[in-house]
């Protein structure tokens, strides 16, 4: 890498080790880093993210995907001239095959889906609380939790079981292929992002093309969504989340309307070609400054 003109680092998965790598490269090549979230690993990573902020000072340019991350970096004392905003286009997972779709089954009541890694900041516990309150009020729907846990999920599952609603919970815990995640989205009626905090969400961007009703918190990028793209609730507030879920649970037309707007929003976002062009422009700026 030291012989390259520029090195672009997408992720810094282990800050103590990454410092050694960057120390060897600093001064020998231009360094660019994409900051996916200003709070590394959302404070859930322990030693994995310890020292991440100091690494940012080693880069010639930092790329962020929205104003939320930019503002957070500015608040951390990073020079605005080093921060470049390039909006993240929608993504598409590998398409589910017949076997994956068959394994999911068809819902007979509205199906709510949470998918992705399960971590404290993502608010899955809040979603469980919201669903319990709605089930206890007599509303019929099912909840699917799909993804690899990075926290103890047993208490949440036991809480649902103890309340008598185990038959309304579907779990698919563990590492899931893109095809299996895609199948979950195809079979869902609603996709829920109850995050306590977030800058930008790849999971949300990968779900847009399915045209399913979205329910989010108002954290990070979700607060900046155009009105009507998703039903939103105050971050960290389980009763508010239940209130946002209820109209969509009760009405297929409302779900379809939200789903159509989510799909249209994804269609109107920038393309990967746009992002590539912007990124190449950043590379040229960095190299010109070094020259």
Image (cartoon, grey):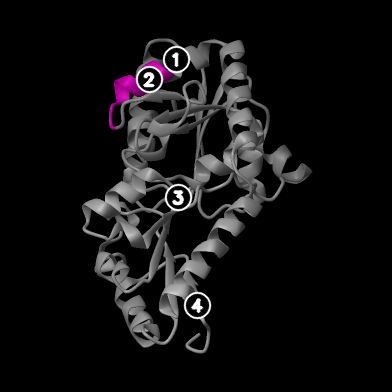
- Camera-near label (3 vs 1) is 3
Q: Nearer the viewer, mark 2 or mark 4?
A: 4
Which residue was labeled with disc 3?
65
Q: Nearer the viewer, residue 70 or 254?
A: 70
Q: Which residue is mark 1?
A: 246
Q: Quadrant of the C terminus?
A: bottom left
Q: Which mark is residue 148?
A: none
Does the CB distance between marks 2 and 4 fall below 8 Å?
Answer: no
Q: Is residue 251 left or right of residue 84?
A: right
Residue 242, numbered circle: 2
**Residue 57 x %, y %:** 28, 70
Residue occupying the point 78% across, 42% down? 98
Disc 1, SS: helix
Local packing at callout 4 (Cα closer than 10 Å; few below 14, some 14-19, many 20+) is some
In primary-sequence order, the first of circles 3 and 1 is: 3
Residue 6 tag number: 4
**CA distance separating discs 2 and 4:** 48 Å
Give the distance between the C-alpha atoms of the residues marked 4 and 1, in whole angstroms.
50 Å
Which stretch did the figure color magenta? 236-244
- Magenta span: predominant SS is helix
- Viewer-proximal residue among 133 and 281: 281
């Amino acid at each position: 890498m030291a012989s390259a003109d520029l090195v672009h680092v997408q992720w810094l998965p282990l800050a103590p080790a990454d410092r050694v790598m960057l120390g060897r490269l600093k001064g020998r090549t231009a360094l660019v880093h994409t900051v996916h979230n200003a709070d590394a690993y959302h404070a859930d990573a322990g030693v994995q993210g310890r020292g991440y902020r100091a690494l940012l000072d080693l880069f010639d340019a930092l790329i962020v995907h929205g104003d939320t991350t930019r503002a957070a970096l500015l608040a951390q004392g990073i020079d605005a001239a080093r921060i470049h905003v390039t909006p993240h286009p929608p993504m598409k997972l590998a398409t589910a095959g017949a076997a994956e779709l068959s394994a999911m089954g068809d819902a007979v009541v509205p199906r709510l889906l949470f998918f992705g890694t399960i971590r404290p900041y993502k608010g899955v516990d809040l979603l469980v609380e919201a669903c319990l309150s709605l089930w206890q009020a007599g509303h019929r729907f099912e909840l699917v939790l799909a993804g690899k846990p990075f926290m103890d999920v047993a208490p949440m599952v036991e809480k649902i079981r103890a309340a008598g609603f185990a038959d309304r919970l579907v779990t698919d815990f563990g590492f899931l292929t893109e095809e299996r995640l895609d199948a979950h989205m195809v079979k869902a009626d609603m996709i829920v992002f109850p995050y306590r905090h977030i800058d930008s969400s790849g999971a949300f961007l990968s779900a847009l093309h399915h045209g399913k009703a979205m329910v989010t918190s108002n954290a990070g990028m979700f607060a900046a969504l155009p009105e009507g793209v998703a039903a939103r609730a105050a971050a960290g507030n389980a009763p508010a989340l239940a209130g946002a879920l209820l109209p969509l649970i009760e009405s297929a037309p409302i779900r379809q309307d939200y789903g159509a707007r989510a799909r249209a929003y994804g269609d109107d976002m920038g393309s990967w070609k746009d992002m590539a062009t912007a990124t190449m422009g950043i590379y040229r700026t960095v190299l010109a400054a070094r020259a």
